[in-house]
Amino acid sequence: MKLRRALPIAAVIPALLAMSACSGESADSDGKKPKASTSASAGAKSKQSPEEKEAAEAKRLGAFDRKALEKAAITGKTAGFDAKKIAKAEVEAGRGMEADKKACQPLASLIGGFTHLPAVSTVHRSLQPGEATNATVGSMWLASHSEDNATRVMKELRAAVADCPKGFKTLGLTYGKVEGRPAPKLGDEAVGYRITGDIGKQKVPMTYTVVRSGGIIAAFYGVNMLDQNHAAIPEAVVKAQLEQLG
């Protein structure tokens, strides 16, 4: 089905149209400069790999590092969809999505595949339907924060949905309408909404389901060019991911 094959690049991660931007320090970090230490201690710290530093930060905050988050993310056939890892270069293309309206930033960041508050770690999956008759395609990602920051992400996302009904622009792309949608009663809290994006000459309704479980934000994006009322990633997929998180 040509439609299905084209959408993952053009719509599943719209931010692929944008240039890759550099990531910043995790918002969960306290931002304080380290105190002076002995040369031996400083030398030991300088030898830490990025993965070791991330693991230490995750442990300090009670969050997941990337390795643990990868194990927690669904992979393979799940509830009628096939979840596959996404190339790092494609994922990184979504960083730095800045909305022209500050209140809409949580929405712009999620379009790019990241939370507006930088997470300790994030992993992504594309979601392809297992049945040829299912025209819904999408993606999902898990972002690990401290629980306080994850709660803040949801609060500010909910406010953005309410404050940006007429949409916003980011990196030359126009998202003309934002409307709240029903969210599943899963996890600790959930938000559902739809954004209509102007992709070329087409208006593409993109449906999001975002769920918080402790310090993990699980975001699901779906699009169906044949029937926008069936664009959301099914609740069964969301539930399966939350169950895997434990």
Image (cartoon, rainbow, N blue to C red):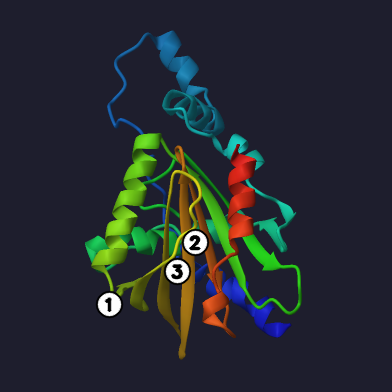
Residue 222 at x, y percent in the picture: 55, 69
Whole-percent x and y of residue 44? 49, 16
Front position in the image: 149 or 32: 149
Mark 1 sits on what residue?
A: 166
Looking at the picture, does residue 91 appear above or below residue 122?
below
Task: Please name the residue that numbered disc 2 is placed on.
Answer: 93
Viewer-proximal residue among 71 and 159:
159
Q: Residues within 10 Å of mark 1 (few under 14, many from 20)?
A: few
Residue type, numbered disc 1: Lys
What amino acid is found at the position of numbered circle 2 in the picture?
Ala
Mark 1 or mark 3, which is nearer to you?
1
Q: Residue at x 66, y 39 (%)?
A: 71
Closest to the observer: 157 or 27? 157
Q: Secondary structure at mark 2?
A: loop
The relative height of residue 4 versus residue 244 in the rendered view (above or below) is below
**Residue 67 coordinates in the image, percent (x, y):** 61, 36
Measure how far apart labels 1 and 3 are at the Cα level.
22 Å
Outermost residue, front side: 185
Q: Which residue does the image show at 61% across and 49% down from the upper left?
A: 241
Identify the residue at image location x=24%, y=66%.
163
Task: Specify which label sits upstream in the sequence, 1 or 3.
Answer: 3
Q: Between disc 2 and disc 3, whose residue precedes?
A: 3
Q: Secondary structure at mark 3?
A: loop
Question: Can residue 172 be seen in the rendering of this structure?
Answer: no
Mark 1 → mark 2, Cα distance in angstroms? 25 Å
Quarter of the figure that contains the C terminus:
top right
Within-10-Å neighbours for mark 2: few <14, some 14–19, many 20+: many
| In contact (CB < 8 Å): disc 2 and disc 3 | yes
